[in-house]
Amino acid sequence: MTDHRVIAVEEHFTTRAYLERAHGLDFAPGDRTEVELTRAVESLEPTRSRLLDLDTRLAAMDAAGQDMALLSLNPPGVQPYAPADAAGLARDFNDELAQIVRDRPSRFGGLATVAPQAPEEAAAEIERAMGPLGLHGIMINSHTRGHYLDEPQFAPLLAAAEAHHAPVYLHPRVPSMLDQYSRYGMSGAIWGYAAEASLHAMRLILSGTLDRHPGLSIILGHLGEGIPYYLKRIDNRHAFAARTQGAATTMPHLELTPSDYFRRNFTITTSGIDDPDALDLALRAVGDSNIMFAIDAPYEDTAQSVAFLRTAPLTDTQRANISHNNAERVFGLT
Ligand code: MN
């Protein structure tokens, strides 16, 4: 194969200054399970070093042939914290991230962190991130204290993302309906993350939010959190429900079909799914212009993920698009 540039777009890290402040803060009671688990993960080796040490990460990138990583704060980031604390944490973290990107612009890009629980501050931070800080978008770790971006209080955040061309990476976290996912280890990446992130994406689609913000660019990891598998059924059942129950439900009129929004406003990434059959389905569902490579480092293995990208059954054009062209277009990475 041609040696395509390799850009991975869901790559988590943190900083010592961030951990020192964040681990001392109070958080929303409903977020206790997730925050305590996150703090343990961020404090214990080897994950602590893998999150903090960018030189070791660069060595792993070099060994695997990965050119660039689009960095983001370790989930769930600032979203469990009180609004003023979260907004301040986000600004300081974004300053550090911007310096990392300025120091090594050919190796690192950055997705800013914002505090949705402080929507006006989040809007200002998006403008700062996409302007003076030179970052490439934002990451939102799904719900914020049980609230979702289709709710009206988040309109300023979405308007700023649209106005400043900030792609929004909608990353999973432990479901807001934690009770129903708390057994059998289901709340995390095995199932709860996809349930939570797909719920959030479907709320954005079915609420009409993307009629109000048609220019939003939203990224979903994990090959679209299951949605590509269901697109035909979603369209079919949405049309049926709109015909038969429209007046009796809270279903808003949509200008497009659900799958139209998914193909227009969303890009999906391969994070955590090294499965050629799932990738093939995703390609047929959304096309090779809407899929980007991601690893989900340090939680997935860099060498294994890059090997999958290099060997997956793709045409050269498909591999070039997934490997770098789409990330360059969506995030403005040059
Ligand atoms: Mn991730």
Image (cartoon, helix red, strand yellow):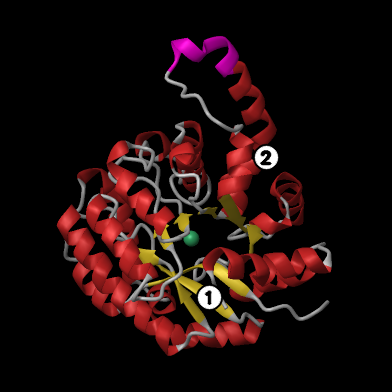
| Residue count near mark 1 (Cα–Cα under 10 Å), binned few <14, some 14–19, many ≥20 | many
Tell me the CA gap for discs 2 and 1: 28 Å
Q: Residue at x 31, y 40 (%)?
A: 146
| Residue count near mark 2 (Cα–Cα under 10 Å), binned few <14, some 14–19, many ≥20 | some
Q: Is residue 245 magenta?
A: yes
In terms of secondary structure, where does tag 1 sit?
A: strand
Label 2 sits on what residue type?
A: Tyr
Of residue 69 and residue 175, the one placed in the foreground of this image is 69
Q: Which residues are magenta?
A: 241-249
**Image quadrant where one finds the C terminus:** bottom right
Query: What label does residue 227 carry, if any?
Result: none
Q: Residue at x 65, y 36 (%)?
A: 231
Q: Which residue is mark 2?
A: 229
Q: From the viewer's perspective, is 102 left or right of 236?
A: left
Q: Which residue is mark 1?
A: 69
Label 1 sits on what residue type?
A: Ala
**Could you tell which of marks 2 and 1 lies nearer the N-terminus?**
1
Q: Residue at x 59, y 34 (%)?
A: 258
Residue 167 visible in this rendered orientation of the protein: yes
